[in-house]
Image (cartoon, rainbow, N blue to C red):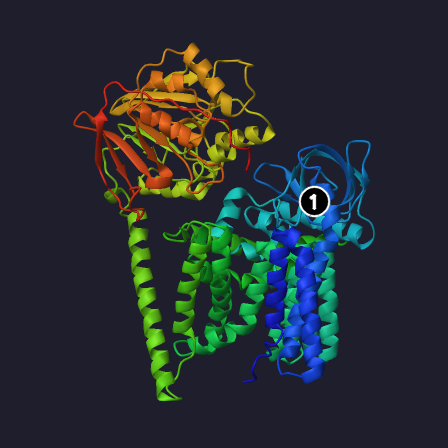
Amino acid sequence: MKSRDLRLVPVALAVWAAALVCVFQPGLAAACALVCGVAAGVVLLVLLARGRHGAGLVLLMLAAAAATALSVGYALPSREAAAGRGGRVVEAVVEVTSSASTGQDGRLWVEATTQSLGPPGRARPVAVPVRIGTVPADGLDLGARLRVVGETSATEAGERAVLVLYATTTEVVQPPSGVFGVAATARRAFVDRALRLPEPGGALLPGLAVGDTRAVGSDLDEDMRSSGLSHLTAVSGANCAIVVAAVFGLTALCGGGRALRVVLAATALSGFVVLVTPEPSVVRAAVMAGAGMLSVLLGRPSAGAGVLALSTIMILVSDPWLAATPGFALSAVATGALILLAPPLSRGLRRWMPGPVALAIAVPLSAQLACGPIIALFAEQQSLIGVAANLIAEPAAPVATVVGLLACLAAPVPAVADLLAATAWLPATWIATTAQVTADLLGATILLPAGIGSAALVAGLGAAVAVVCLEGGSRGPRWRVRGGAVLRGGAVTVLVVAGSLAGAQALLSGPLATAATPDAWSIAACDVGQGDALLVRSEGAVALIDTGPAPEPLRDCLRSLGIDRLDLLVLTHFDLDHAGGVEAVRGRVSAVLHGPTADADDERTLASLAAGGARVEQASAGFRGTLGGATWRVRWPVRDTTAFPAGNDLGVVMEFSGGGVPRSLFLADLSAPAQRLLQRSERLGPYAVVKVAHHGSADQDPGLYQALSPVVALISVGADNDYGHPRRETLDLLGALGAQVYRTDERGRILLGLRHGALAMWSETTPERRGRRRGSGTSCRSAPNQRQRSSDRGVGRRR
């Protein structure tokens, strides 16, 4: 076996490190370029004078790092000038550089490069990357020139786009022309043809073939992520590799030589990139795929790592901001894993299975082992069934991609295009069904807090899996054999322990979930991070107040409490931290009460709930009803009030009492002014439990809390959040009133109920021991007459 040429890998890592430093600390770009340039000059002199071995590699590293820093420094003046427009209304003429995708806020989002930017009517020439969100419209294709007016928001350091522009008006000045215009027309025709086919395959097919995922519903999108199949619709290196392999194989069958195969494969890859829009992520995927494929096609697989490293260097020097994007890291690392890790994994797995099966498993396994730590840095959800789902679905992916592309190209002959699209629909449906079935399996995903700690944990477990699977033998020096055996034994031990813990967790959150939960609870604060999701239960009937920022944490909470259906859902308002998890309960709700809507996105959320069978009604003060044996009442907002805009200050305030539920008030995200109006408009007596407004922010009215006199103050808040919640002033206020403060960031899920006439609390952990200990029951002050109050300004919408 030939050894890998890894000499350029340190250079690529040096460039990546320099890019990260310079894009996150732009002020250091000039110094970094100077230091690296001077150091490179010194090394060059040493190399010329003494010819020291290894100095050439150091010279390359320093020179490449200096070039990267210079690239950042060259772009900084225009980026800083554009960033100064953040928070203002601007007019911009832009050229679209990406395909459009629908965001969680219902807007259509595209990447673009500005041609001019400035106050309306006074735009000045400047070229910087921006991200634009606008209402869904036609004509937002790659290469189109737009005139956009809207409010801007400056991005954080490290982001590739300098500004986010929320468009109020969008005008297509010039549609895409040339090959981009032809590609846009063919793409639209194919998407229209695919959407005439039955769901879910019809919606997924455009994503598989041309990377257009706008038709993919949120449920299917979530299933694709949970099952580890979302890369199939992301125009990743896999899609590019499929195109290259198909053309190369077809040319070989027709008797073409290696040179012809390479030329035709490269031509097809270029055409594919144009068809699916050559945005930076697609170009990146094509370069990575081309690097990996060409090294194999040219008969030099050992050069693959060097080609990949060279490609990475070229991309980062030309666009250093890509170094900070998860997509670039995943693309580069996955390609590297296929080149370096998959072959030895395949040889190791052959000890237990036939060669073809071992190779089929080694490919997705190597990619998942390499990408898992990166995913854990940015996302909380880790797929545990990704390898299995890919083994089932991936044989269908090349068929759907290639036949779908042929259907797209055959648009001038409708009968042929229809036949090809229908043929591609079959494997697309297979992939969609695989995603739906595997995502619903017990333990399909696991939630870990995003960050370095989780990345280190995932990396450690991945390393243990790799050690167990890699080829081992009995030949070689005794100490090396013995050391390898010890290493494999340690890896097996780690995996056994991790598997046991994961299995226990799966049982406790699945079949045994309710057995591990106290039965006497009547109020539950779900641990959904920085957001609200609170449950009230009486005689088997259940109400949910808000859904938190994302579906998965809410699903886990409902599953652990054995809740399959909700009698009442209250959406206090529509900010992401209160309504972002609606998909977790859609189709499982009987009635919905909601606060005032602010825009079409809010109306779409309600329409989706109504389509799932819920009765939807806007709440206002005076609404009453029952929940099992308990009664509920809406205390705020006053009907038709114009004192506040829709949002935090018009959030629905709910009161529950009776039927085993301690007298409770849930204050949504009201700020101090709204709290004062609430107190004036409603006669509020003492409460046993009060959900503190806006995650314990400082914007609270002390007078209201004194009137509420809570025994227990619940604060639903995310650990280490960026808002400083809960604020010390609010905690001091609650402490002065004698309230016992329970926070989800310290205790995880919190359960409250009446036990022997007293208010009792159970939590997953304690502030002193954050080790997820269940069932730590404690008694509170007796609960007949208590109250609480809280308020705060709203967290930004759709954050």
Q: Nearer the viewer, residue 410 or 308?
A: 308
Indicate the quadrant where residue 540 lies: top left
The location of residue 185, given as percent across then percent down, is: 76, 49
Which x, y percent locates residue 314? 69, 65
Is residue 29 among what the camera can see? yes
Judged left or right of residue 36, residue 184 is: right
- The kind of residue on which mark 1 rests is Val
- The location of residue 394, given as percent across then percent down, is 53, 62
Please tell me whether residue 558 is drawn above or below residue 237 in the rendered image.
Answer: above
- Point out the image quarter for the N terminus: bottom right
- Number of residue marks: 1
Residue count near mark 1 (Cα–Cα under 10 Å), binned few <14, some 14–19, many ≥20: many
Q: Of residues 358 and 121, which is closer to you in this image?
A: 121
What residue would you read off at disc 1?
Answer: 130
Between 33 and 10, the residue placed more toward the observer is 33
Q: In terms of secondary structure, where does tag 1 sit?
A: strand
Q: Nearer the viewer, residue 309 or 104?
A: 309
**Residue lying at 44% horizontally and 54% vertically, measured from the top left:** 382
Q: What residue do we see at 35% from left, 40% from top?
A: 746
Whether 642 is drawn above or below 607: the answer is above
The answer to which image quadrant residue 258 occupies is bottom right
Asked whether residue 426 appears in the rendered view, the answer is: no
The image shows residue 155 at horizontal and vertical percentages of 63, 43
| Residue 258 sits above or below residue 275 on the image | below
Indicate the quadrant containing the C terminus: top left, top right, bottom left or bottom right.
Answer: top right
Left-right relation of 333 to 410? left
